[in-house]
Amino acid sequence: MDKAELQELHYITLISNIPSIMARGILSNKSAKKIRHQSLAKEEIQDRREKKVIPGGRPLHEYANLYFHARNPMLYLRQDHHNKICVLRVNIRVLDLPGVIITDCNASSDYVRFVPAPQGLKIVDKELTFAEYWTDSDPIQMYRRKSAKCAEVLIPDRVDPCFIIGAYVSCPEAKVSLEELDKRIQITINPHFFFR
């Protein structure tokens, strides 16, 4: 993948977390533990991520994680709560920050590769990462496709709020909820993004 092919990066969060994010930024797991917030993460995945250390870098939980495309298995698992979730749109300029790492699949995967940005974009399989679906009749291919859909951009410690350029929501109800918490965010209703 080439940087010119990217328009934005994504962060999945509960709408209720928006005031904190707009004040503090998108925080690493380690930093977020110090403040009151609600998490969408599955505990068993977080347990795996907590043990992972990036080769030549820091523990995975010291990075804020963004997706190349948030219409992925993580969001699919939370589709029943679509009206409480938003996907923040993040400016690709974060790729130029010091210490940013790119993965070719979910960072907790056993077979993940970690490469510094921006040259790490070359390991991302654009076709798989931006595919509409990740299902496959072959279980090994399905695992590969599912993991690639969750390719990540890892930013040390936090993503400053100045990089947030908008948000996607699934429905008018979610748009109203988000507008009540922050009027600065440009909101786009996109049901398809949320598997609606």
Image: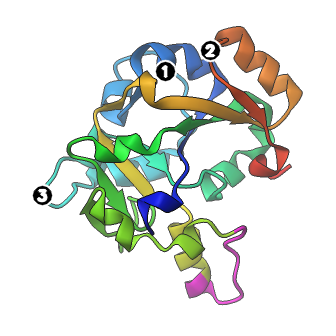
Query: Residue at position x 34%, y 19% from top?
Result: 34
Task: Identify which residue, 191 or 110, lies in the foreground.
Answer: 191
Q: Which residues are magenta?
A: 132-141
User: SS class of the residue under badge 2?
Assistant: loop
Q: Residue furthest left?
A: 56
The mark nearer the N terminus, 1 or 3, is 1
The mark nearer the N terminus, 1 or 2, is 1
Residue 159: % across, % down: 38, 31
Q: Are marks 1 and 3 in contact (CB under 8 Å)?
A: no
User: SS class of the residue under badge 1?
Assistant: helix
Query: Residue at position x 55%, y 25% from top?
Result: 38
Residue 136, magenta (yes or no) = yes
Give the residue pinned by disc 1. Answer: 21
Q: Are marks 1 and 2 in contact (CB under 8 Å)?
A: no
Give the residue pinned by disc 2. Answer: 184
Magenta part mainly helix, strand or loop? loop
The answer to whether 155 is drawn above or below residue 119 in the figure is above
